[in-house]
Amino acid sequence: MNNMSNRPVRPQGAAIGDRIPFCANDESGQWRIQAMSAVTGPELPIARYLHIGDGGPENTPVWTLSAFVSNLRYTTALERQALHEQQAGLGRADAQHAVLIPIRKNAVWWSMAQDERREIYTRSDHTPIGLDYLPAIARQLHHCRDLGEPFDFLTWFEFADSEADRFRELLTRLRATEEWSYVDHEVEVWLTR
Amino acid sequence: MNNMSNRPVRPQGAAIGDRIPFCANDESGQWRIQAMSAVTGPELPIARYLHIGDGGPENTPVWTLSAFVSNLRYTTALERQALHEQQAGLGRADAQHAVLIPIRKNAVWWSMAQDERREIYTRSDHTPIGLDYLPAIARQLHHCRDLGEPFDFLTWFEFADSEADRFRELLTRLRATEEWSYVDHEVEVWLTR
């Protein structure tokens, strides 16, 4: 009954509710996997390429993580305005690097009510830290907790070669926050076009 | 990779992320459909039974709506405590009536930020109105907007025969709120065991 749905299309071409598969495999993909490492929790199996979208029969997935683009869950109207004014889109010609970061938060996080989670999000400067790296580091959040996936979020970052050190700084700052104390599984997947 | 997931199981037996199909058909189901009517927007096709869960080959679906149980998106810690203290579970022996209400909210609602949606939710007394009918009218919210389904939510209510008039009053009060002005598709499906 999907034809009854009429959702606004996102700038990146993914509509709300579209399920996007991120398929790691050894044959082909839009992105070559440069490095993979678990920051917290178990590693993901090593693979050579990341294919985004439904794969053809030529691709044997080593692992597939699926997620969807949704509305923002914590961001206020003021924060969103600041983000919109400063952020850049995905797919810029000079953004030859991408990093996929699958994250899972623990049961304590998810047992909290909306206002309790929002308070930690605010105290952790989640939005201000991200704003410091705009527009150089573009970002798209994908949700997967509600799909029964092993992670809760897949965050996608894109940036130019010159911005790699600043991107590492962004990760260091976020991981030092109170919010990140609730992360119990996090993997970095570094990619080049 | 679902085996990596370890989610708390809900009292009703549905785990976070479990996708639950509500399958209307003419052959069989745990619930008999008594009446169906669209409050706003198009009707759903008429059927005789509602089967919840994966159907066997003997059931030809007239329509199927799928959704998942998730964490609360607006409820504060205080509100949640009040709900937990007063609410009853699903499946009570005397709760012979159920109503399934699929709801879709319009693009204006979803274009608002979290704080803007929460303000309308608060001004609309969404939680206080629901509390007035606890524990007599049990309720479970299911999400489906992120699945590309035609509705955003499937709300499930259960109550005894003696509570039907109070349930209608609950619906009347909710539908008179500011929040409901953003609902552009709503159907009532009345059921008996």
Image (cartoon, coloured by chain):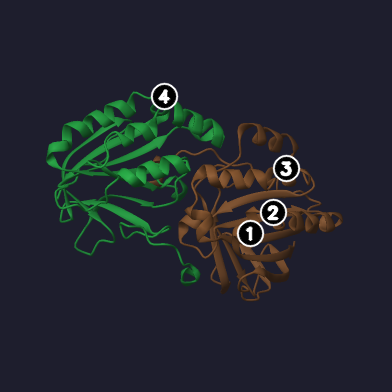
Chain colours: A brown, B green
Badge 3 and badge 2 both on one subunit:
yes
Label for residue A128? 3
The residue carrying mark 2 is A177
Q: Nearer the viewer, residue B75 or B36?
A: B75
Q: Residue at x 25, y 37 (%)?
A: B188
Point out the frontmost of discs 4 and 2: 2
Q: Amino acid at mark 4?
A: Glu
Residue A39 lies left or right of residue A94; in this view the side is left
Question: Label 1 belongs to which residue?
Answer: A181
- Please report contact status of discs 1 and 2: CB closer than 8 Å, yes or no: yes
The residue that appears at 39% across and 52% down in the rendered structure is B69
Provide the chain ID for the residue under circle 2.
Answer: A
Q: Do the CB atoms of the residues marked 1 and 4 lie less than 8 Å apart?
A: no
In-image side of B87 versus A126 (left or right): left
User: Marks 3/1: CA distance?
Assistant: 18 Å
Q: Residue A24's spot in the image, x, y percent?
A: 61, 69
Q: Say if mark 4 contacts mark 3, CB within 8 Å.
A: no
* Secondary structure type for disc 3: helix
Q: CA distance from mark 1 to mark 2?
A: 7 Å
Label 4 with label 2: CB-CB less than 8 Å: no
Look at mark 4 in the image and give the residue it sits on.
B178
